[in-house]
Image (tube, rainbow, N blue to C red):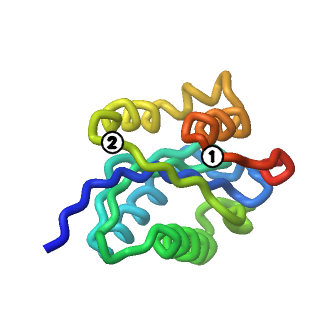
Amino acid sequence: MSYTQIYYHIVFSTKERRPVLRAQDREALFRYVWGLMENRNCRLYRINAVEDHVHILSGLHPSIALADFVKDIKVSTSMWIKENGLFPGFAHWQDGYGAFTHSEAEKAVLVGYIRSQEEHHKTVSFIDEFKRILNEAGVKFEERFLG
């Protein structure tokens, strides 16, 4: 028996950070992602998005690699969005993603942070937010790949 408790905070954006994720249709996207995760025995703690990016707080089944998990979500949702015409102007997700591990003690704060994305992004841009997350996690990055 394997026992794990790893909270992943995953962030990815639309291609060229186009503001196409309309608020009125996001709930359908969230339900679809939840279904994908349930089918893979993963746990969704919180998902939210604004017009140009998505935040997910999840736990992965021990048999699933993070890169495969994110790829599955991005590929499946891209196809589903296009098939259903959900977000006009959506081309696909930006290449790459951010994924950060957190502890049980941080979970409630992260859930609140992800829940309040609309309010948060009234004053903070995606790039500034992502740089802050990278810096807090101690991840070295090159500015040219963030733009």
Looking at the rendered structure, the secondary structure element under dot 2 is loop
Q: How far from the left and from the top, in percent, is residue 126?
A: 69, 38
Across and down, in percent, residue 67 comes to 52, 71
Sequence-wise first label, 1 or 2? 2
CA separation in Å, label 1 and label 2: 17 Å
Residue on which the image places disc 2:
103
Q: Amino acid at mark 1?
A: Val
x, y percent for residue 93: 67, 64
Residue 36 location in percent, x, y?
38, 71
Picture residue at 74% right of the left edge, 67% below the top:
91
The residue positioned 67% from the left and 27% from the top of the image is 124
Residue at disc 1, secondary structure: loop
Quadrant location of the N terminus in the rendered image: bottom left
- Residue 67 numbered mark, or none: none
* 70 up-or-down from 135: above or below: below
- Name the residue at the right extreme: 144
* Residue beneath the point at 36% across and 62% down: 34
Q: Write down the quadrant of residue 118 in the picture.
A: top right
Badge 2 local density, few (<14 within 10 Å), some, or many (20+)?
few
Task: Report the residue marked by disc 1.
Answer: 139
Above or below residue 72? Residue 58 is above
Q: What amino acid is found at the position of numbered circle 2 in the picture? A: Ser
Say if mark 1 contacts mark 2, CB within 8 Å.
Answer: no
Q: Is residue 35 above or below residue 101?
A: below
Q: In the current view of this chain or complex, which residue is farthest to the left?
A: 1
Relative to 8, 77 lies left or right: right
Query: In this image, 118 relative to 110: left or right?
Result: right
